[in-house]
Structures are given as C-alpha cells and as structure tokens.
Amino acid sequence: MGRQFQYGLQKITSRIKLLSIELIIVLIAFFISFFAMVFIIRRIFFYKKEEMDHQVFEFLSRYVSDATTAVMNFFTFFGGQYFLVPANLLLIAWAFYHKRDKWFGIRVAS
C-alpha cells in the first residue's frame, strides 16, 4: 500500500510541475504579446504615428487580387470560430474517449 501511495503522489507532483512549467511559458508569451500590443496601440492611437501602417499597406497593395484574397480567406477560415470550436471539441472528445487520456483532454480544453 505504501509504494502505491508514493507512486501516486509522485505522479501527481510530476503533473503539477509539468503544468507549472507550461503555465509559466504561456504567461510569458501572453505578457510579451500584451506589451507588444500596448506599444502598437500607444504608437498608433495616442501618438498618431501611422506612417508604418501606410508603408505596409502601400507595399502589400501591389499583391492584392481576387486570387490572393481567396487564398487569404482560405487561411483565415482556419483561425475563425467556425473551424476552431468544432476542432477543439473533436480533439477533446478524441482525447477522452479514444485515447483515454483525460490529462491531455483537460489541457486542450484549458
């Protein structure tokens, strides 16, 4: 009984450590993205420095056509709710029922 308890406790602590490392990485990525967005928002809306936007739009306007718009709409679909919500639900269901890995399903859901 003692070995099983130690094994179970060790398994739980290793999962908590893994979750902590993943959480730290996600938080670092979040704060880097957040501060980059704050910098861009300040630059554009408060300082009215829109020359970078205009340069990017001028550069990309050469490549605008019906074909490139269709390609970009295709890729945009994969970042939208009509794809991501069902894909995540299917991935969670696959993890819980087919793979029988509840931990993976919980991580995908979170």
Image (cartoon, rainbow, N blue to C red):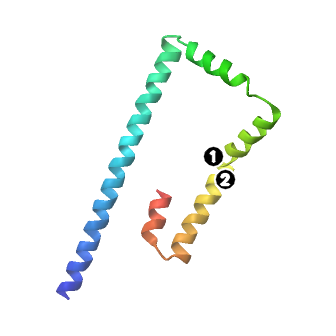
Residue 108 percent location from the top left of the image? 49, 60
Label 2 element class: helix
Residue at which label 2 appears: 83
Kindly identify the residue that appears in the image at 57 percent across and 69 percent down: 93
Depth check: give the residue in front, 4 or 60. Answer: 60
Kindly identify the residue that appears in the image at 24 percent across and 79 percent down: 7
Kindly identify the residue that appears in the image at 35 percent across and 51 percent down: 23
Horizontal side of 89 relative to 65 (left or right) equals: left
Label 1 element class: loop
Q: Quadrant of residue 56?
A: top right
Residue 42, disc: none
- Determine contact: label 1, label 2, CB under 8 Å: yes
Kindly identify the residue that appears in the image at 67 percent across and 18 percent down: 58
Residue 1 percent location from the top left of the image? 20, 89
Mark 2 belongs to which amino acid?
Phe
**Mark 2 surroundings: few (<14), some (14-19) or many (≥20) residues within 10 A:** few
Q: Quadrant of residue 20?
A: bottom left
Horizontal side of 28 relative to 99 (left or right) equals: left
Horizontal side of 65 relative to 48 (left or right) equals: right
Residue at which label 1 appears: 79
Mark 1 belongs to which amino acid?
Gly
Residue 41 percent location from the top left of the image? 49, 22
In the image, residue 37 above or below residue 47: below
